[in-house]
Image: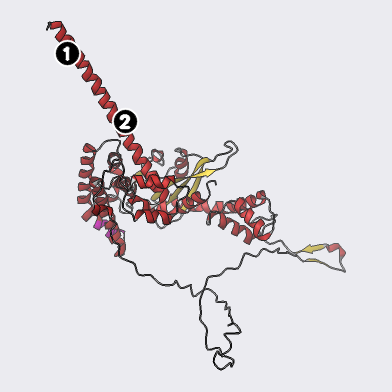
Amino acid sequence: MPAHSEAFLREINAQLHRQLAVKDQALALAEMKVLALQQELRLVRIAKYGNRSETLSDLQLELLDLEPGVSSDEVAAESERSPLAGPDQGSRSESTDKPKDKPERKHPGRQKLPSHLARVEQIIACSCQQCTCGQCGRQTQVIGYEETEVLDVRPAEYFVRVIKREKRACKQCAEQGVRTAGAPERIAPKSLLSDHFIIDLVVGKYCESLPIYRQQVMLSRDGGVEIALSTLNDAVMCVGELLIPMVEVMKRDLLAGHYIQADETPVGVQTHEKSGRNHQAYFWQYGSPGKGVVFDFRMGRDRDGPKQFLGQFEGLLQTDGYQAYAKVGGPKITHACCLAHARRKFVDAVKLNKNDTASARIVARMDELFAIDREAREKNMDQQQRDALRQDRAPGLLEKLRADLLEIQKKALPKSATGQAASYALALWSKLTLFLMHPQLELSNNLAENSMRPIAIGRSLCPSF
């Protein structure tokens, strides 16, 4: 074969290899994207159907999505079945197909109602036939009662309180004029609504997650009373104005301390600019263990919220890894991060892949750190004693934890759930371990998250604020 033909074939072969390498790279990238989307979809489905759905296979979750409505009981029943074999799971042995026998739990018995509730007796008399002896025909006597307690309720009773203020005048001295008794202090002085009604309205909105328009419908249905929505809204705004000075005092007390935990949560808000859909606003939470909690409502999630609230605060600020908390406060502020947020990302990775032993090992390492503080709480240790316990046990655990994270970062795909979790923890490592230098610092800001739980519940019941 001529030399130029061999060179031509080698060139063609090299081009084909380059094209194949490009195709392989594109295929690998596509597979990574598909895996990431599958993991994201699984997490969304688990969040939708609750913790019991974590044990379900992807195929079982997909079947639940096809149902028009799925109750928690159905999810629980599905979790007790053996996983369905999908196209990527292959066949299973008979031993894995059979559900494991679960020990039967003993029924706790009928629940007893609280003793502090008033008891109202209802006596049910026997029928005429039961009042006569079937043998001799004589009248039978009451010898006792078969008692059953049930929880009952009286419907809300709406009434009109007529406030009469005395008007007095002297019959002899007309020039003195008429004197009228002073009007009582009220939340909304000129409103149609009493203080008790307004308080009930506010409790319903913020504690029971009942929006004002729903309470308006309930009032019309149960009491036959039509009250304008603007009247109800104005009453709630009056309560807010009265609470502003109290919130300002709580804020000053919080900023005067040396330790603040912060977090934020979205809430839908109806606006005139976005008719038909809600604007996503945010509640920013600021609190400290042992102190009050202050909520700051903002229409956005940018840095202006924490920057304006914190001002020149120069103590410890503990948050998650959200960048809006960077470059806030005074020049001497110390920014710590939450170990629970880092742990949660590895928990999600385990939810996606039960065979992810690396993520499970990280979760176990972090649990050992939390166990130190749990032991301190159980033994009623003060802050100094807890710090001594931390200094004794935590450094060795942190050294092993960091080594495991570095190993995961080397081996795991960067875009995988495990790889992203490791990168998150390592990027914030110095902020996650500040508790060794600051004894008052908690391992997580779970206290801040717990204070926002009512908002999250209300958001699921009422999509707009």
- Quadrant for residue 205, please give it: bottom right
The residue depicted at 20 percent of the width and 44 percent of the height is 403
Main secondary-structure element of the magenta-colored stretch: helix
Q: Which residue in the rendered view is the most extreme toward the front?
A: 135
In front: label 2 or label 1: 1
Residue 262 in sight here:
no
Q: CA distance from mark 2 to mark 1?
A: 30 Å
Check disc 2 and report the residue beneath it.
30
Circle 2: element type: helix
Where is 461 relative to 118, above or below?
A: above
Which label sits on residue 10? 1
Residue 64: x and y in percent read 41, 48
Residue 459: x and y in percent read 50, 49
Q: Nearer the viewer, residue 333 or 278?
A: 278
Part of the protein shown in magenta: 383-389
| Lateral position of residue 33 relative to residue 240, left or right | left
Name which of mark 2 and mark 1 comes first in the sequence: 1
Residue 49: x and y in percent read 41, 50
Report the amino acid beneath label 2.
Ala
CB within 8 Å, label 2 to label 1: no
The residue depicted at 61 percent of the width and 65 percent of the height is 155
Q: Nearer the viewer, residue 23 or 299?
A: 23
